[in-house]
Image (cartoon, rainbow, N blue to C red):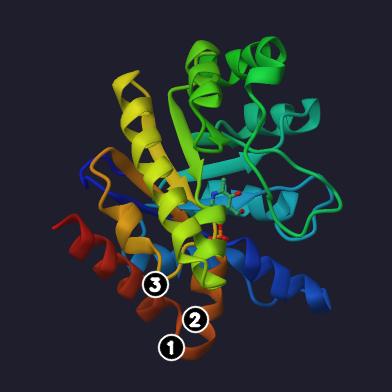
Amino acid sequence: MSQTRSLRLGVNIDHVATVRNARGGAYPDPLRAAKLAEEAGADGITAHLREDRRHISDADIDGLMAGLTVPLNFEMAATPEMQAIALRHKPHAVCIVPEKREERTTEGGLEVAREENRLAHFIAPLREAGCRVSIFIAADAKQIEAAHRIGAEVIELHTGAYCDAHAEGHFEARDRELASLREMSAYAHSLGLEVHAGHGLTYDTVKPIAAFPEVRELNIGHFLIGEAIFRGLVPAIAEMRRLMDEARG
Ligand code: PXP
């Protein structure tokens, strides 16, 4: 993604594909959404090719690689199939996420500490192919240290628990989550990792996270695609961008 902005916005277009797949066929087209997101000021596009292909398809990834002018952040599970696809496309960035078939969305961060050896071997060829490797983890020092040891350049902190606590009105829990995200952003940065964050962010929850000076990129999808129903995709993204810039001062 563009290195010129201190806080980049990656727009996740998975749920344009969810709507398309509800009926089959070709409409709405995730690539068209991605091009509009570029127009609205997205610094990058994120897409998660899930093992069960419930939203983004292999053909979507082909189209995004061919049609985007901003970088693609390719989210994937640490499986041989996904590794082969990533090595074929060599996207700008690969974000390794945990994946369970039965989950509705990516529920937690990756257990890097438990699988350090396997993940170190898994990401090595991706790094050699020139992809920036990011690991999606909870705000937990043990996971951050493991991500650092396996050679990841980037960690993405899972903001889902913070956003859920806010949505449910559990403000003490929300503030605890926020404090630990803040502390772990600074810790990861001190180890030399680039820090990204995302999952569940909305207009109501984005600013405190965007204000962390160490965070370089936010990846936001579901809320923006939903908000686009009411105000259109370009204005929905432009408003998120405005809030991020405001938080950054
Ligand atoms: N970052 C990662 C690693 C994700 O897995 C997701 C969801 O696919 C997001 C960001 C975006 O989350 P949301 O769609 O809730 O904004």
Residue tagged 2: 228
> Would you say 223 lies left or right of 55 here?
left
Q: Position of residue 14 (x, y in %)?
A: 63, 61
Task: Name the one closer to the observer, 19 or 136.
Answer: 136
Question: Which numbered dot is residue 231?
Answer: 1
Vertical side of 9 occupied by 242: above or below: below
Q: Position of residue 2 (x, y in %)?
A: 30, 44
Question: Alpha carbon of mark 3 to alpha carbon of mark 1: how far?
Answer: 16 Å
Q: Tell me what residue is drawn at x 70 percent, y 56 percent.
A: 105
Task: Name the one closer to the observer, 229 or 23.
Answer: 229
Q: Amino acid at mark 2?
A: Ala
Does the CB distance between marks 3 and 2 fall below 8 Å?
A: no
Q: Residue reaching furthest front?
A: 172
Q: Tell me what residue is drawn at x 31 percent, y 58 percent.
A: 208
Question: Alpha carbon of mark 1 to alpha carbon of mark 2: how far?
Answer: 5 Å
- Nearer-N-terminus badge (3/1): 3
Does the CB distance between marks 1 and 2 fall below 8 Å?
A: yes
Quarter of the picture holding the N terminus: top left
Question: Which numbered dot is residue 204?
Answer: 3
Q: Position of residue 188 (x, y in %)?
A: 38, 27
**Few, some or many C-alpha atoms within 10 Å of disc 2 (few <14, some 14-19, many ≥20)?**
some
